[in-house]
Amino acid sequence: MLRRPLLRAVPCAFSLAAFAHRWTACPAAGRGNDMQGMPAASHVRDSDSVLVAVGGNAIHPDHITGTTEEQEALAASAAQALLPLLRMDARLVVTHGNGPVVGKILLRQILTRDQVAPMRLDVCVAHSQGGIAYLLTQAMENALRQAGSQRMVACLLTQVEVDPSDPAFGHPSKPIGTFFSEAEARALTAQGWNMMEDAGRGWRYAVASPLPRGIVNLSLIDTMARTGAIVIAGGGGGIPVVRADDGRLHGIEAVIDKDLTSALMANLLGIDTLLILTSVPRVAIHFGKPAQRDLGVVSVAELTAYRAEGHFASGSMAPKIDAVLRFLAHGGKRAIVAHLEQAAEAFRGEAGTHVAADA
């Protein structure tokens, strides 16, 4: 069993409706956050709660071809890294990215568009959410059974409400899919693709990435987590939907940033620790330069200043920093950014970058 760090959880105490408005700074925010009728009983310790956000590039790195067998092996590796957390007597929600996978789904559609009718991007997100969560659910339950635990893992197909007038729809900024060279990117741009450079790693397809406003069926996520099940939800940032005046939902083409959705979900659920797992060991300033410096423990003020100075790449580390700052500003107690393979060590305070809420 993983021992709880010295930092104690403090129950979240704020108005859900007022919080959703402040978090998104959007007048109609939070309409999808249905937290009425929450059960009073809990089968796990509510004082121990964590949301683990697993990065898409961490579970689907760019060096693999993407076969099912490769993805199964990576899911199994991720489950082993997360096992000490999975075995805790704590409320645990897991989110995951989908950038590489949904981009490949989109590319597959483009290459076969003359033979097979393409799906809308929101449906592509749903496909990636289900496929990735299936592999993670199976891998986590296998790891738990081998460790002698009967804890269950449940996956919830998650819709996330966005604002149809979000400026992001006019400025695609979310990189997804395969990495291309600059020359390849120029050729694809000439064919009508929106391409962007991604943190010095190559060029990728760019799509709209609006802010999450509300988590549809949030109460169901909370209910399942309180029974002791590990809940996988909000995959790929959630399936983007908009709500009509009569309350009906319908999909919209976008990919929501999974870290921003994770922060919103953690705040709305009253979770005190946000653990963002990626493919680098720590947040760094002057990344990739001779003066690069990894950050161990950093204050909110320091991190805000580094963000303003432009140290974090858009579409890469910047959304993670934004998620950390939003989470801590709206009731979260501590946030950690670490390598997936160091998940347990990071939770214990022995690895990663740690940011605590201001006293």
Image: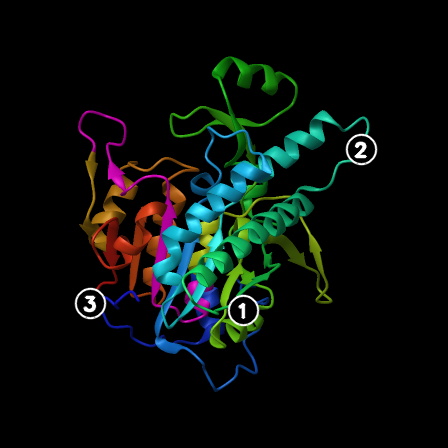
The residues tagged by marks 1 and 3 sit, at their Cα atoms, a distance apart of 30 Å
Q: Looking at the image, is mark 1 or mark 2 earlier in the sequence?
A: 2
Residue at 34% across, 60% down = 84
Tell me if residue 13 can be seen.
Answer: no
Q: In the drawing, what numbered circle is on residue 221? A: 1
Q: In the drawing, what numbered circle is on residue 116? A: 2
Residue extent of the magenta highlight = 265-292
Instruction: Determine whether, in the image, residue 88 is placed left or right of residue 184.
Output: left
Q: Quadrant of the C terminus?
A: bottom left
Amino acid type, callout 2: Val
Number of numbered discs: 3
* In this view, the mark in front (1 or 3): 1
Q: In the drawing, what numbered circle is on residue 359? A: 3
Residue nearest the observer in this picture, 24 or 13: 13
Tell me if residue 208 can be seen.
Answer: yes
Q: Secondary structure at mark 3?
A: loop
Amino acid type, callout 1: Ile
The residues tagged by marks 3 and 2 sit, at their Cα atoms, a distance apart of 56 Å
Amino acid type, callout 3: Ala
Residue 98: x percent and y percent? 53, 44
Residue 107: x percent and y percent? 64, 30
